Image (cartoon, helix red, strand yellow):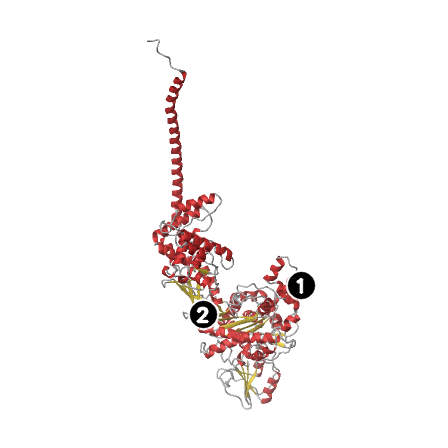
Amino acid sequence: MVDNEKPHKPDQQHRSSKNKRQPQRKRKIWRYFFILSGVFTIMLLGVSALVASYVAKIVPTTPGVEALLHARSAQPSILLSADGTHLATFSRGQQEQVGLEQISPHVLEALIATEDHRFYEHRGIDVSRTLSAIVHTLRGDAQGGSTITQQLVRNLFPEEIGRTRTIDRKLREIITAIKIEKAYTKDEILETYLNSVPFLYNVVGIEMAARTYYDKPASELDVVESATLVGMLKGTSYYNPIINPERAQKRRNVVLAQMHKRGLLSEDEFNAMREQALQVKLTRQPDPLGVAPHFAAYVRRQLIEWADANDYNLYTDGLVIQSTIDDRLQQMAAEAVERQSQVLQDIADVEWGRSTERVASQTPTAYGALRKNVEPFSYFWSARPELLDAFVRETPEYKKAISSGQTDEAALAKLKANTGFMTRLRDNKTRLEAGFLAMDPVSGEIKAWIGSRSFERDQFDHVAQAERQPGSTFKPIVYGAALEQGLRPDRVYPDGQVEIRAPDGSVWRPTDMSGFSGRMMSLREGLIYSKNTITAQVMQDVGLPNVLRLARDIGVNQSRLDPVPSLSLGTSPVTLLEMVSAYSTIARVGSYREPVAIRKITDRDGNVVAEFDTEAHRVMSEDTAIELIDMMRGVVRQGTATEVRSRFKIVADIAGKTGTTQNNTDGWFIMMHPNIVAGAWVGFNDSRVTMRSDYWGQGGHNALLLVGDFFRDTIKSKMIDVKAKFPQPKRPPPVLVNAPSDAWVDKVTENMEMPPGYGVIQRESTTIVIAPPEAPPMERGSDSAPMLSSDELNRYLSGIGRDPAPVPRSDTATSSGGSGGGSRQSGGRDLIFPDVGH
């Protein structure tokens, strides 16, 4: 029935409407989801494209396969002598490559368990570990996520990859790690890693680390030792078992725990091992010192510059460098320096160990016995207590005490009460030092180089690094400039008080140890006898700029030369290398050649990649150099260096110059021979300590001993040709004077003033010869010698720069021209006068 039908209720209508809207809402949600998904996908694709683009951009800049091969096969470069003897190895640290089979398996287990337990599963990147490290880092707990391969990348390519915490660096590291995994096996990667990781104390690689910390090879390391060394890899300084044993032990136990976790150690083994002490035994691995360690350090600096400029790596490219050092000469130099330095040390110990200033002996070897009866330098320290306090205040120990709050008085008292500290301080300050250098003057090659008495005790190089006042060894440069300016060796100056006014108005009054003679002296005598008064006047006449210019030109071109008058006496500090180079220029008769330390460089395959030679160029006229050498011969024959002949019995054509600075602070001697030029410096590192007596403080009595000893050995071993001669100055032929009578000759020779350094060296009944003392006797009767009359003799004497002698007139004296040089007139005599060289 119709009446029985019931109408719809309101809630039923609501449900019906709601059911109709639900599909619409779901469609809207899905629409939003798809939109958001699309946006996210587009963003992800965009970011991926950007990352891919960036990665594609940096891939070519990361190390390639060739670089990987080179890095894995990295070899240190070696330095050889001219004879092929090994002098030095250039590497980033002491390193010995070993194969994986030569490394204890415990090391490999500890390394993989701790640093990269999925090493054999990934291809360079452990994704899960990297993501975990990122999460921990975001939480403020920074953790390393690098695999062993990634760590190897940082070890092999520190400059190309870097160590900064940036995305760019991480991407480069990841890309290079993947390249390594593609190019090498897992075992090759492990071997390279363990051979390249640093372990402090200048050692690199597991082999040297095992020797340094446990005094055993890597193959013999046990589990605990292996865990200790692997533990250091997280931070070698922080976990250094020598300096920080507690930290190192905790870190070692972390490594043992990881090994236990990976099933490499049982519970009992782990518990027993973590209780063990470290038991490290530091055994420093000494650098193998060659016969010329200071020279090797000097060459290293040159090679680093060369390698940087020519795209080589000195420490990994396996270069072979052939130097100029001569093995035999280097050994002779080392022995000479050691022998004579010890003699001089004995002299200093004795002279400063006694209260008297009297020279005990002029025989150097006598002091060895005298030293047994004195306490070395006892008088020096008792007479100068304030200096000892000054030395103490300069030590790191004193400065540390002051910084901790101690007063000056307390710090001094405590340190001076420390017997061991004071003994070391006194010994270091009173240890005499020396430098020695020998060069081939023709080629410019360095043949022998001794930078100090002992490289282990004093690595400071007294050849190329130490700048000391050269004293009178600088004077030949002054006289060389004088000769270049036209002054002649017979030019005379008064040997008396000299006053030179400086631009600032001050007055400089040079003096000499021997005082003033009051007579006229020539340039030749001024150099031979090392007269300060004469040298200062020569400097004034020549001009300071000309002296400075010549000094720079002939080899003193690194140190600063003060443009002051006292420069003439060697007051500006220079290096021994510069001075020997300058003397080599003189010995090379005026041609400068830059000192040569390296002959050639070859790569690991034997290909010559560089050759080194320097061209000589003239900086001083040949005549000047020859005349200067001749003047310096006089220093050895009759001047301040005569002991080199008398004490060492050297019979050869040698020339040189001694040098001594104020208060006997520095002693120098440089000697020239046509085959070799050698020089030595002697003194103390601290200029407040000096030789005591003026006798042994002179370069002609101290540094000369080193050079003389060396030359004596080179002659005995026939390393130099004793018959070799320097060129002689050009001397005009002698002139013959027809003398009318004996009385005439007597009158001439009585009143004639001889040129400086000249004298009558031969007189017969009919002939006299005037020449330098070192000239050989001349025979009369030369057909080429012109005959001079009395008037011509007068003019001749005037021409050589001397006042003419009052020559007696004789109506019977005749001139017969130049053709009858050997004849003489009846009742007359011939006088032979060689001209004075210019």
Quarter that holds the C terminus:
bottom right
- Mark 1 lies on a secondary structure that is loop
The reply to whether dot 2 and dot 1 touch (C-beta < 8 Å) is: no
Give the left or right position of residue 421, taking residue 166 as reference.
right
Disc on res. 505: 1
Q: Picture coordinates of residue 803 (x, y %)?
A: 61, 78
Of residues 289 and 278, which is closer to you in this image? 278
Q: Picture coordinates of residue 84 (x, y %)?
A: 40, 69
Quarter that holds the N terminus:
top left
> Gap in Å between the C-alphas at discs 2 and 1?
49 Å
- Mark 2 lies on a secondary structure that is loop
Q: Is residue 348 above or below residue 254?
A: below
Disc on res. 325: 2
Give the left or right position of residue 237, taking residue 752 as reference.
left
Query: Which residue extends farthest bottom?
Result: 827
Q: Picture coordinates of residue 817 (x, y %)?
A: 51, 83
Of residues 338 and 594, which is closer to you in this image? 338
Q: Which amino acid is tagged 2?
A: Ile
Give the left or right position of residue 520, taking residue 602 as reference.
right
Query: Which residue extends farthest left?
Result: 1
Of residues 62 and 193, which is closer to you in this image? 193
Of mark 2 and mark 1, the one earlier in the sequence is 2
Disc on res. 633: none
Q: Picture coordinates of residue 616 (x, y %)?
A: 46, 67
Q: How packed is label 1: few (under 14 Cα within 10 Å), some, or many (20 or more)?
A: few
Residue 767 in sight here = yes
Of residues 292 and 743, which is closer to you in this image? 292
Q: Which amino acid is tagged 1?
A: Gly
